[in-house]
Amino acid sequence: MACPSVEEFKELLHRESVEKIAGDHVFGGDIYLAQMFPRVLNTLRRHLCPRLGLEQENVIIIGSAKIGFSLDPNTFPRRFTNNRDIDVLVVSEPLFDIYWHTMLRWHYPRRLEHLPQSDWQWVLARRHDLYWGWFHPDQIGYGGLTFPDVLKPLRDLKTKWFDSFQSLSLYEEFLGRDVNGRLYRTWEHALLYQAAGLRQIQVRLAEGETK
C-alpha cells in the first residue's frame, strides 16, 4: 500500500476509523524512507533483533520516516526531511515485563513505608509509563534512588538499548540521524496510542485548526 499524500490522509481521517488508519498506514503499507533506502527495515531488524532479543515482525518504523509527514498532533503535517529523526516502534512482552517485575521487586518490600522523595517521584513516573503501556528504555534515569542494586536489570537494559540504537549509525540508512525506539507491551497498547494521536488530528481538522 503506497504512502498517502497529506491531502489523501486528511480524506482518510474524514471517512475511516482511526484504528483502521493506524493499522493500514501507521503499522502497514509502504515506508517513505524506503524510496531512498529500499532495505531500511531489513537493516533495522537485522541489527536490533539479535541484540535485544526481539521478533523481527515486532520492530517497525513509524512517524514521518514511515508515512512522509509528521503524525504528531502538534506538528502534523510537517514533511519528513533528511535531518528528521527516525521513530521505531518495538513490541515485546518479555522486555516490558522485565521492567514491570523488576520495579515490583524493588518496591514491594517497602510499599507500606514512606519512600524518599526521589524514590516516590520515580515511582510516579513509572506508574505513568505502565498505565499507558510503553517505555523509553534509554530515557529512564536511576540516579539518587535507594536500593539501586535491585534495579540492575533495568540499568543493563537501558545500556543495551542505547548502544543498539546508537550503533545503527554504522549503516548508510541511519547515518547522521537520531533513531528513537519506544517499547510497548503489546500491539493493542501500540494501537491505542497511535489511534489517540490520530484522533487529535481528526478533531483539529474538524475544527479547522490544521491547514
Image: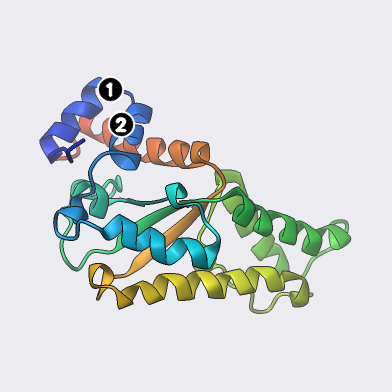
From the viewer's side, name the closer residue of 123 and 29.
Answer: 29
Dividing the picture into quadrants, the one containing residue 194 is: top left
Dot 2 or dot 1: first in sequence order is 1
Kind of residue at disc 1: Glu
From the viewer's side, name the closer residue of 94 and 200.
Answer: 94
Does residue 89 appear to the left or right of 155 in the view shown? Answer: left
Few, some or many residues within 10 Å of mark 2 (<14, 14–19, 20+) = some
CA distance separating discs 2 and 1: 7 Å
Give the image location of residue 147, x and y in percent. 79, 75
Give the residue at x 33% y 57%: 42
Give the image location of residue 100, x and y in percent. 69, 54
Give the residue at x 31% y 56%: 41
Secondary element type, mark 2: helix
Q: Is residue 190 above or below residue 47?
A: above
Judging by the rendered image, the residue that carries numbered circle 1 is 16
Few, some or many residues within 10 Å of mark 1 (<14, 14–19, 20+) = few
Secondary element type, mark 1: loop
Judging by the rendered image, the residue that carries numbered circle 2 is 21
Q: Which mark is residue 200?
A: none
CB-based contact (under 8 Å), mark 2 and mark 1: yes
